[in-house]
Image (cartoon, rainbow, N blue to C red):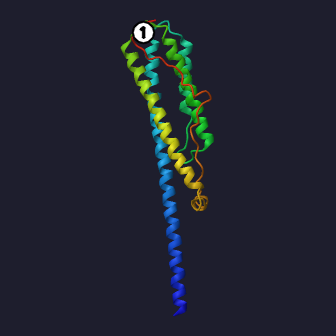
Amino acid sequence: MKKYSVLLIVLALVIVIVSWGVSIYNGLVQKDEAAQAAWSQVENVYQRRMDLIPNLVNTVKGSADFERSTLQDVVEARAAATQVKVDADNLSEADIARFQKAQDALSGTLSRLLVSVERYPELKANQNFRDLQAQLEGTENRITVERKKFNETVRVYNTAIRRFPRNMVASMFGFGKKGYFEAEQGAESAPEVSFDFGKQA
Protein backbone atom coordinates (compact mmCIF):
# COMPACT_ATOMS: atom_id res chain seq x y z
CA MET A 1 0.00 0.00 0.00
CA LYS A 2 2.85 2.39 0.87
CA LYS A 3 4.59 1.56 -2.41
CA TYR A 4 1.38 2.36 -4.29
CA SER A 5 1.06 5.76 -2.52
CA VAL A 6 4.68 6.67 -3.27
CA LEU A 7 4.17 5.69 -6.90
CA LEU A 8 1.07 7.90 -7.11
CA ILE A 9 2.94 10.83 -5.57
CA VAL A 10 5.86 10.40 -8.01
CA LEU A 11 3.43 10.09 -10.93
CA ALA A 12 1.56 13.22 -9.81
CA LEU A 13 4.86 15.13 -9.57
CA VAL A 14 5.90 13.98 -13.05
CA ILE A 15 2.53 15.09 -14.44
CA VAL A 16 2.85 18.51 -12.75
CA ILE A 17 6.43 19.01 -14.03
CA VAL A 18 5.54 17.91 -17.57
CA SER A 19 2.44 20.14 -17.58
CA TRP A 20 4.54 23.04 -16.34
CA GLY A 21 7.16 22.42 -19.07
CA VAL A 22 4.49 22.12 -21.77
CA SER A 23 2.85 25.34 -20.59
CA ILE A 24 6.15 27.24 -20.70
CA TYR A 25 7.05 25.75 -24.09
CA ASN A 26 3.67 26.69 -25.57
CA GLY A 27 4.00 30.23 -24.18
CA LEU A 28 7.42 30.60 -25.81
CA VAL A 29 6.08 29.26 -29.12
CA GLN A 30 3.28 31.83 -28.95
CA LYS A 31 5.75 34.67 -28.36
CA ASP A 32 8.03 33.38 -31.13
CA GLU A 33 5.09 33.27 -33.55
CA ALA A 34 4.10 36.81 -32.53
CA ALA A 35 7.63 38.02 -33.32
CA GLN A 36 7.54 36.28 -36.71
CA ALA A 37 4.13 37.80 -37.47
CA ALA A 38 5.45 41.25 -36.52
CA TRP A 39 8.40 40.66 -38.86
CA SER A 40 5.98 39.78 -41.68
CA GLN A 41 4.25 43.13 -41.18
CA VAL A 42 7.62 44.91 -41.35
CA GLU A 43 8.38 43.11 -44.61
CA ASN A 44 4.92 44.00 -45.96
CA VAL A 45 5.37 47.74 -45.47
CA TYR A 46 8.91 47.67 -46.89
CA GLN A 47 7.55 45.72 -49.89
CA ARG A 48 4.90 48.40 -50.37
CA ARG A 49 7.69 50.98 -50.58
CA MET A 50 9.60 48.76 -53.04
CA ASP A 51 6.47 48.55 -55.21
CA LEU A 52 6.01 52.34 -55.26
CA ILE A 53 9.58 53.12 -56.29
CA PRO A 54 9.42 51.96 -59.96
CA ASN A 55 6.32 54.11 -60.53
CA LEU A 56 8.02 57.08 -58.87
CA VAL A 57 11.18 56.60 -60.95
CA ASN A 58 9.19 56.27 -64.19
CA THR A 59 7.22 59.42 -63.42
CA VAL A 60 10.40 61.36 -62.70
CA LYS A 61 12.03 59.99 -65.88
CA GLY A 62 9.32 61.84 -67.80
CA SER A 63 11.05 65.07 -66.88
CA ALA A 64 13.65 65.12 -69.68
CA ASP A 65 16.28 67.17 -67.88
CA PHE A 66 16.10 65.37 -64.50
CA GLU A 67 19.46 64.12 -63.17
CA ARG A 68 19.92 60.55 -64.39
CA SER A 69 22.52 59.76 -61.73
CA THR A 70 19.98 60.40 -58.95
CA LEU A 71 17.50 58.02 -60.58
CA GLN A 72 20.23 55.42 -61.12
CA ASP A 73 21.19 55.61 -57.44
CA VAL A 74 17.56 54.92 -56.43
CA VAL A 75 17.26 51.98 -58.84
CA GLU A 76 20.56 50.48 -57.61
CA ALA A 77 19.69 50.97 -53.93
CA ARG A 78 16.29 49.33 -54.49
CA ALA A 79 17.94 46.37 -56.25
CA ALA A 80 20.45 45.99 -53.39
CA ALA A 81 17.69 46.18 -50.76
CA THR A 82 15.63 43.48 -52.49
CA GLN A 83 18.63 41.13 -52.32
CA VAL A 84 18.76 41.21 -48.52
CA LYS A 85 16.53 38.45 -47.17
CA VAL A 86 15.93 37.63 -43.52
CA ASP A 87 14.60 34.26 -42.39
CA ALA A 88 11.70 34.81 -39.99
CA ASP A 89 12.82 31.73 -38.02
CA ASN A 90 16.22 33.31 -37.41
CA LEU A 91 15.79 37.00 -36.66
CA SER A 92 19.35 37.44 -35.42
CA GLU A 93 20.88 40.81 -34.59
CA ALA A 94 23.32 40.49 -37.52
CA ASP A 95 20.54 39.71 -40.03
CA ILE A 96 18.32 42.56 -38.80
CA ALA A 97 21.31 44.95 -38.96
CA ARG A 98 22.11 43.83 -42.53
CA PHE A 99 18.47 44.31 -43.58
CA GLN A 100 18.30 47.71 -41.88
CA LYS A 101 21.54 48.88 -43.52
CA ALA A 102 20.20 48.08 -47.01
CA GLN A 103 16.85 49.75 -46.28
CA ASP A 104 18.56 52.83 -44.80
CA ALA A 105 20.68 53.15 -47.96
CA LEU A 106 17.47 53.09 -50.01
CA SER A 107 15.88 55.67 -47.71
CA GLY A 108 18.87 57.94 -48.23
CA THR A 109 18.66 57.77 -52.02
CA LEU A 110 14.90 58.37 -51.93
CA SER A 111 15.44 61.45 -49.75
CA ARG A 112 18.01 62.78 -52.22
CA LEU A 113 15.57 62.17 -55.07
CA LEU A 114 12.78 64.07 -53.31
CA VAL A 115 15.11 66.96 -52.47
CA SER A 116 16.26 67.10 -56.12
CA VAL A 117 12.65 67.38 -57.25
CA GLU A 118 12.44 70.78 -55.55
CA ARG A 119 14.35 72.21 -58.55
CA TYR A 120 11.72 70.97 -61.02
CA PRO A 121 8.46 72.91 -60.64
CA GLU A 122 6.81 71.12 -63.59
CA LEU A 123 7.50 67.77 -61.91
CA LYS A 124 6.23 68.99 -58.54
CA ALA A 125 3.03 70.08 -60.28
CA ASN A 126 2.52 66.62 -61.87
CA GLN A 127 -0.52 65.04 -60.17
CA ASN A 128 0.78 61.49 -60.62
CA PHE A 129 4.07 62.44 -58.96
CA ARG A 130 2.26 64.19 -56.12
CA ASP A 131 0.07 61.11 -55.53
CA LEU A 132 3.09 58.82 -55.49
CA GLN A 133 4.94 61.16 -53.15
CA ALA A 134 1.97 61.19 -50.75
CA GLN A 135 1.77 57.38 -50.86
CA LEU A 136 5.48 57.16 -50.18
CA GLU A 137 5.15 59.48 -47.18
CA GLY A 138 2.30 57.32 -45.82
CA THR A 139 4.38 54.19 -46.34
CA GLU A 140 7.34 55.69 -44.46
CA ASN A 141 4.99 56.37 -41.54
CA ARG A 142 3.75 52.77 -41.65
CA ILE A 143 7.33 51.51 -41.67
CA THR A 144 8.03 53.48 -38.49
CA VAL A 145 4.90 52.09 -36.80
CA GLU A 146 5.59 48.47 -37.79
CA ARG A 147 9.25 48.65 -36.77
CA LYS A 148 8.17 49.93 -33.36
CA LYS A 149 5.62 47.10 -33.00
CA PHE A 150 8.25 44.57 -34.06
CA ASN A 151 10.75 45.84 -31.49
CA GLU A 152 8.12 45.69 -28.75
CA THR A 153 7.12 42.12 -29.69
CA VAL A 154 10.77 41.05 -29.78
CA ARG A 155 11.39 42.71 -26.41
CA VAL A 156 8.58 40.62 -24.87
CA TYR A 157 9.98 37.45 -26.46
CA ASN A 158 13.62 38.17 -25.48
CA THR A 159 12.56 38.93 -21.91
CA ALA A 160 10.58 35.68 -21.73
CA ILE A 161 13.48 33.47 -22.86
CA ARG A 162 15.86 35.06 -20.33
CA ARG A 163 13.63 34.81 -17.26
CA PHE A 164 13.97 31.92 -14.84
CA PRO A 165 12.63 29.21 -15.10
CA ARG A 166 11.61 29.78 -18.73
CA ASN A 167 15.27 30.19 -19.70
CA MET A 168 15.84 26.47 -18.96
CA VAL A 169 13.02 25.40 -21.30
CA ALA A 170 14.11 27.99 -23.89
CA SER A 171 17.66 26.65 -23.80
CA MET A 172 16.51 23.01 -24.09
CA PHE A 173 14.37 23.72 -27.14
CA GLY A 174 16.65 26.23 -28.90
CA PHE A 175 14.70 29.47 -28.45
CA GLY A 176 17.38 32.07 -29.21
CA LYS A 177 17.52 35.83 -28.82
CA LYS A 178 16.09 37.90 -31.68
CA GLY A 179 17.50 41.17 -33.02
CA TYR A 180 15.99 44.65 -32.87
CA PHE A 181 15.83 47.52 -35.29
CA GLU A 182 18.31 50.04 -33.94
CA ALA A 183 18.04 53.80 -34.34
CA GLU A 184 20.51 55.27 -36.80
CA GLN A 185 23.15 57.63 -35.52
CA GLY A 186 21.63 61.08 -35.63
CA ALA A 187 18.10 59.63 -35.74
CA GLU A 188 17.15 61.74 -32.74
CA SER A 189 16.82 64.64 -35.18
CA ALA A 190 14.44 63.58 -37.93
CA PRO A 191 15.41 64.41 -41.52
CA GLU A 192 13.36 67.16 -43.09
CA VAL A 193 11.49 66.04 -46.20
CA SER A 194 9.26 68.61 -47.85
CA PHE A 195 5.87 67.54 -49.12
CA ASP A 196 4.64 71.10 -49.68
CA PHE A 197 2.97 70.79 -53.07
CA GLY A 198 1.73 74.35 -53.19
CA LYS A 199 5.18 75.92 -53.08
CA GLN A 200 6.69 76.59 -56.48
CA ALA A 201 10.46 76.65 -57.05
Tell me which residue sits at (63%, 40%) in the image. 94
Badge 1 local density, few (<14 within 10 Å), some, or many (20+)?
few
Q: Is residue 181 left or right of residue 196?
A: right
Find residue 107 and report its horizontal and vertical position in percent.
54, 25
97 shown above or below 188: below
Tell me which residue sits at (47%, 28%) in the image. 140
Q: Dividing the picture into quarters, in which one does residue 199 lie?
A: top left
Residue type at mark 1 is Lys
129 shown above or below 11: above
Tell me which residue sits at (50%, 42%) in the image. 150
* Residue position marked by numbered label 1 in the rendering: 199
Closer-to-camera residue (97/2): 2
Find residue 7 and report its horizontal and vertical position in percent.
53, 85
Closer-to-camera residue (149/62): 149
46 shown above or below 153: above
Tell me which residue sits at (51%, 14%) in the image. 115
Q: Is residue 98 left or right of residue 150?
A: right
Find residue 49 and report its horizontal and vertical position in percent.
46, 28
Find residue 32 and report its horizontal and vertical position in percent.
51, 51
Residue farthest along the front direction in this orientation: 188
Can residue 80 be seen here? no
Q: Is label 1 in a helix, a strand or a loop?
A: loop
